[in-house]
Image: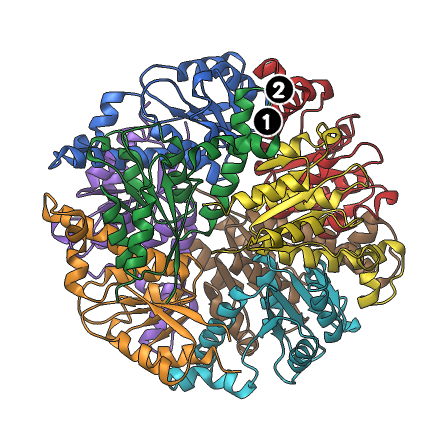
Chain colours: A yellow, B green, C blue, D red, E purple, F orange, G brown, H cyan
Amino acid sequence: MHSLTVYLAGQIHDDWRELFRQQTQERGLPIHFKGPQEDHDLSDDIGEKIKGKQPTKEFRDQAASEINNLRTRVWLQKSDVVVALFGDQYRQWNTAMDAALALEAGKPLIIIRPENLIHPLKELTQRAQLVVESPQQAIDALAYLFTE
Amino acid sequence: MHSLTVYLAGQIHDDWRELFRQQTQERGLPIHFKGPQEDHDLSDDIGEKIKGKQPTKEFRDQAASEINNLRTRVWLQKSDVVVALFGDQYRQWNTAMDAALALEAGKPLIIIRPENLIHPLKELTQRAQLVVESPQQAIDALAYLFTE
Amino acid sequence: MHSLTVYLAGQIHDDWRELFRQQTQERGLPIHFKGPQEDHDLSDDIGEKIKGKQPTKEFRDQAASEINNLRTRVWLQKSDVVVALFGDQYRQWNTAMDAALALEAGKPLIIIRPENLIHPLKELTQRAQLVVESPQQAIDALAYLFTE
Amino acid sequence: MHSLTVYLAGQIHDDWRELFRQQTQERGLPIHFKGPQEDHDLSDDIGEKIKGKQPTKEFRDQAASEINNLRTRVWLQKSDVVVALFGDQYRQWNTAMDAALALEAGKPLIIIRPENLIHPLKELTQRAQLVVESPQQAIDALAYLFTE
Amino acid sequence: MHSLTVYLAGQIHDDWRELFRQQTQERGLPIHFKGPQEDHDLSDDIGEKIKGKQPTKEFRDQAASEINNLRTRVWLQKSDVVVALFGDQYRQWNTAMDAALALEAGKPLIIIRPENLIHPLKELTQRAQLVVESPQQAIDALAYLFTE
Amino acid sequence: MHSLTVYLAGQIHDDWRELFRQQTQERGLPIHFKGPQEDHDLSDDIGEKIKGKQPTKEFRDQAASEINNLRTRVWLQKSDVVVALFGDQYRQWNTAMDAALALEAGKPLIIIRPENLIHPLKELTQRAQLVVESPQQAIDALAYLFTE
Amino acid sequence: MHSLTVYLAGQIHDDWRELFRQQTQERGLPIHFKGPQEDHDLSDDIGEKIKGKQPTKEFRDQAASEINNLRTRVWLQKSDVVVALFGDQYRQWNTAMDAALALEAGKPLIIIRPENLIHPLKELTQRAQLVVESPQQAIDALAYLFTE
Amino acid sequence: MHSLTVYLAGQIHDDWRELFRQQTQERGLPIHFKGPQEDHDLSDDIGEKIKGKQPTKEFRDQAASEINNLRTRVWLQKSDVVVALFGDQYRQWNTAMDAALALEAGKPLIIIRPENLIHPLKELTQRAQLVVESPQQAIDALAYLFTE
């Protein structure tokens, strides 16, 4: 059976990706998950950790982004489906960015978003392949790819 | 020996795909078949099953299509050859759609169609890589890829 | 002001394309329309007219399609938007084909279809950029591209 | 002299695009600007205005987005450079979306953002071709393309 | 009316391209023709003429080809349709090359070939968009693109 | 160690491909070879064998080519390098076609040709990645890919 | 007559591009030339000039490059042919970069280099479409595109 | 766990690639490294070794480059990330070429360069995904792709 690679874009402040990993294993789905660095502090520090102290906060951020974007680009290119989760908190421009990169690259995009974000996300969701409200629904859709 | 992935586009009202699976196994051909959801009721219900009750029949259909198209896009992108079967019944616009997606994506397309559909399908068949009248002929052509 | 080229895919049994040409002119929209050969008899005869008598009806159809597809491919590639009109009559596989070619080529697709075709067209419409029920609505949407 | 088409992505609540149009004219730069619908109410209403009353607020938004995205896709594809302006207000996921579509399509992207957005925009800006803090700086950079 | 660019690939030993230029003018077709250098001696000499004397006949040929291929690549990339004429004489590998480059680039290909070449050209013609036996037929097909 | 797939394009009248298979095995190179049907009679008959008797010799050839091209397209798309062998006999338009398809697809192309074909093949060889005179030289070049 | 756009990559320390502009005008060739900023000081200062003082010399260089690369990317994408001139002085990594960008984008590349650079440039020149030793030869080759 | 292929572009005069191979093994990273021929003499001789004595030094270099470029193209196309190391010595136009090929192909590029090369490499580094000063930093960034 063919296996699929799915990129899980979205915030890294809680462990929402766990549900994907766990259910996939329980249901025996041949899916590998990739995503951004989930350790938030490491994600912010990685630039100076590898490249050394930077002259300003802006350049510190830039250094971190060089390495976080390296990671994102490598795994996005290898993924067959991109799942992007939006929530009420944070600006989540990275999530919007990953979602749009998937759109333009022709990769099927699943957006998960709560009802109260319908309006501000309307253009992005209109171009997604599938829009759902919970991670569970996204997992069910991924499972459907393997039913015969 | 390299294996190939073949997408079998077409109606899901009878089990015509069985012949492909069975003969491939009997002749030892390294081919994996993919295709749409073959359980017709599930295919129509899947939207509301995953996303919940929709406000109108049109939006129910739209929800189902989000998920059916997710499936089609994922497996079409992974396929090396697309086989599209047309028959006398049903409108089969999905079949025409999958066939044309294959054309534009540069994937070799095999069309199977009965003689009486020659005229209405003439533009589509003219651009296919191979046009035959029976699944058996399509299987024979796939087998030819592996003769040395 | 930039002008756009719009391909009008769909049946050639009545003059529905006239409304597009007329309103565009009246509203001063910088749009050029392209489409298939609208003279139905010529469309069927063009193969033998150019290539001479063919051995069977099938090969007569094939000859016509070589030339009709030449036309479609040239103008589809030059178009910025594809409009595909579906109606109750005819099989309209050419329309479905042109619509799906547009999808895969990344060209924005507008589908016009009557309410009673919602179900059989559900997968195709789900991937269109815009779905409307009348040519007038499609024209209004095209006009919206030029409002500032 | 070659002219360029530049897409101005960003909020539509004030007339920041005026500066681009005015200075371009004053400095004699051969640049055409395109962008989203700047009449905010029209942008929200356009779906029901063209497609008629929708069953829910969500579907009203979806209808509007079909038409707004039609516009965005057409002009983004025709643009040579994309300028994306971020500000303190609004969620601006459309802006992030347009910026990322430009990135993936290989179109040079200029991001304008105030200093206090450096951190939340760090991944997106790291992949932009140019990051500035004011529209004036973006215009100066566009003018530089034409100095000989 | 949109104009088209058509590349006329094939031998340069007689003036078969004249018929295209002449009829296009007489019938008022908005077509620009491009093609290889038609002065055969110049085509063979151009390498040494520009780059100077080469050490061997092989390197003289290579120098000429650098410049002939420069020309072919530039105009093939700008063409909307490629016409390739095969005849009984010469090896015509350049013609086969240009035809196949068009195929892979997704440009519609018209092949003109006499009846006695049907067998050796069968794979190439099978993938062409249109196969005819005379330049006149190819011109008629090009004219068909402009009938309304 | 990564393995490579190499397509061996060229005549099918003698067993020149044996040398590639044999030396690759002897030298332990991780290369899989693909190519056209090497049984010449089968290659000519395959159309009627699968699709049944055709109305004319031309359509018999066309039927065979549908299936031979299916094979060629599938394996060319999967190959990392294309080797094209030219010789003194036969028209070899298929070989030129496969070579040019490789060029346009960005696949590295190795051409093998005898000295007396330098002139007629000069444009094709100028665009190849490597031009040699014997299969042995092509094999040596492939082996070089794996030296560390 | 079709006009062409040619990008002139290479050092900006003398006015070698003048010869191209002058001869093109004298010979009536429909060619537009584009290239990097030729005012060397402006090229180095442009970052701080537009973006303001930067914290270190490295970030000053980075700011300049953002804007110089914006210019290069825009005009390279619009060019039909890229000419890259190498000389004895300077590191010329920009020139090598522009040349390789052209190669990968499938744009025909002409390299001009003196005899003594044959060895260090051997891999780059081997993939160029044409290699010459003087700007005059490159101009002659461009003129050849327009001979009929 | 997905494995990655990384191409190590740069000079072949010392064994800097060893550190990558060794640390990758020690840290258990699933990375395969590819790169140019590291035996410098073989790299220069390979053309004549395979193709025989060439008429001039220039053509000797050309023959070697045909084969070295064959190698580079094959492995660059298979790589997920390209690392390009610049140093004080040598012209390193091959390194700049490989780096730019990676940029245009959309492959994430890591550049390693000493501080004193900041100015001459500023345009190339500005477009890289990540710029570091030592191989160790590049390895640390590659390791970061696999942290969960």
Viewer-nearest residue: G49 or H104: H104
Dot 1 corresponds to which residue? Answer: D66
Q: What is the distance, in whole Å, between disc 2 and disc 1 at their CAs?
A: 7 Å
Give residue G64's position: percent from left, percent from top.
77, 55
Which numbered disc, 2 or 1, marks the residue that appears first in the sequence?
2
Say which of E145 and H132 sits in front: H132
- How far across and down, in percent of the image, does residue B55 sit? 60, 20
Q: Is residue C148 visible?
A: no
Are the residues flagged by discs 2 and 1 in contact, CB closer than 8 Å? yes
Give the left or right position of residue H103, taking residue F101 as reference.
right
**Quick one: label 2, few (<14), some, or many (20+) residues within 10 Å?**
many
| Element under disc 2 | helix
Q: Quadrant of the C terminus of chain H?
A: bottom right
What residue is at 87 percent from the left and 55 percent from the top? G54
Task: Name which residue type carries label 2.
Answer: Gly
The chain identifier of the residue carrying mark 2 reads D
The amino acid sitting under disc 1 is Glu
Q: Chain of mark 1?
A: D
Count residues near mark 1 (Cα–Cα under 10 Å), then give few for <14, some for 14-19, many for 20+.
many
Residue under the point 69% across and 21% down: D44
Total numbered labels = 2
